[in-house]
Amino acid sequence: MRLHRILRRASGLLAAAAMALGLLTFTGAGAASAATGGGAAALAAANVARTAGSCADTPTTNSLGGTQFEHSCTGGASGGPEYWCADFALWVWRNAGFYTGGLDASAASFLTYGQTNGTLHTSASYVPQPGDAVVYGSTQDSDIHHVGIVTAVNTNGSVTTANGDWGGDPNASTMAQFAVSSKVVSITLAAGQTAVGSVPTAVDPADGYVIKGYTTPAAAAPANPYTPTQVCGSGYTVIDTHDLGGAVVDLLYNASSGRNCVVTMVSQPSVAVPLDATLTVQGGATVDDPGSYTYYAGPVSAAAASACVKWGGTFRNTMWTSDWGHCG
């Protein structure tokens, strides 16, 4: 395994060098993309009045038929609901075709994303655009508290936004209680209150929400240059997959050797992130490959010609493991 990790990191360095020399023709995060700010704005607006999902007091599906926005119903304590304004904004950008590397369930990640990708606007003269994320801090502390999506820049100078996890029960005593009672709400920032540094009265004057910046989404990152069959080796075929939201866990089988193989593949790699791939043979041992990787975790493999297996993986803070299956 040590040799495998050394070789994998070496291959990653070679790939990076080739890209720098122009030998690879992937489309980078700053290049042209079919994704548009207008598309993101329309998708955000289409979900106004939707709730966190199947876990909500009033269950709804999102406009694409999903049962939650990213991990709005499952990202909290013990797999329950979480504050989901950033989940909503991330979901909008990802499904509109933009790069979402580095974003997570914290509103602050949208500020960091803008800094990392050179798309953060903190000048008071910046005019927000449809699809931008508007990031709020507070006049009462230095934290980042909320993020919404700009859905329209109006002719009168006002700006309309869609805000996930808004208007929850004010008496909620836990994150989950607030999350299941909130929804996506449209809020219009009045003309003269849209600039960075403004404290829009339409948002929440009691909390003193202040606009800390607008972040424009970056174009889609390169696709992963590796495939599960390349990683596991000749003779392996993908027999099952599970989406982790930003990465995919693949279970493969080699009929000649009777071995299973598991690999967790990052969908749009950019930087090293926490990953793992796991495989357990019923009645046997568990093999895994936890670490911080750019492209994939694994491969992990084991003989399982006549046994059931559990398989799974981790991407960032999302972990999944299957039930026993694929027996014999």
Image (tube, helix red, strand yellow):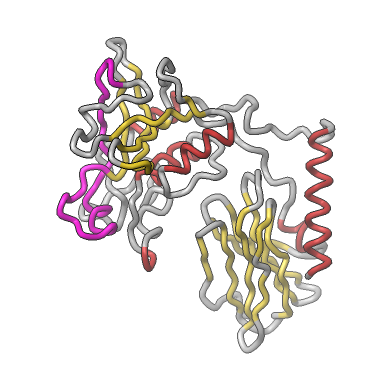
Quadrant (top left/top right/bottom left/bottom right) for the C terminus: bottom right
At horizontal 84% and vertical 32% (from top left) the residue drawn is: 21
Residue 260 covered by magenta stretch: no
- Residue 114 vertical placement versus 306 (above, below): above
Q: Nearer the viewer, residue 120 or 98?
A: 120
- Residue 104 vertical placement versus 238 (above, below): above
* Image side of residue 99 versus residue 15, left or right: left
Q: Which of 202 and 324 is in front in this view?
A: 202
Magenta segment boundaries in residue numbering: 166-193
- Number of on-image labels: 0
At horizontal 35% and vertical 48% (from top left) the residue drawn is: 84
Residue 9 placed where, x, y %? Answer: 78, 55
Residue 48 placed where, x, y %? Answer: 28, 36
Q: Quadrant of the rendered structure where residue 138 is?
A: top left
At horizontal 15% and vertical 54% (from top left) the residue drawn is: 171
At horizontal 34% and vertical 40% (from top left) the residue drawn is: 146
* Image side of residue 289 versus residue 7, left or right: left
Residue 193 placed where, x, y %? Answer: 28, 20
Q: Quadrant of the rendered structure where residue 159 is?
A: top left
Q: Quadrant of the rendered structure where residue 303 is?
A: bottom right
- Residue 252 vertical placement versus 92 (above, below): below
Residue 241 placed where, x, y %? Answer: 59, 60
Residue 187 covered by magenta stretch: yes
Quadrant (top left/top right/bottom left/bottom right) for the N terminus: bottom right
Considering every residue shown, the one lying at the far bottom of the view is 283
Considering every residue shown, the one lying at the far top of the view is 155
Considering every residue shown, the one lying at the far left of the view is 171
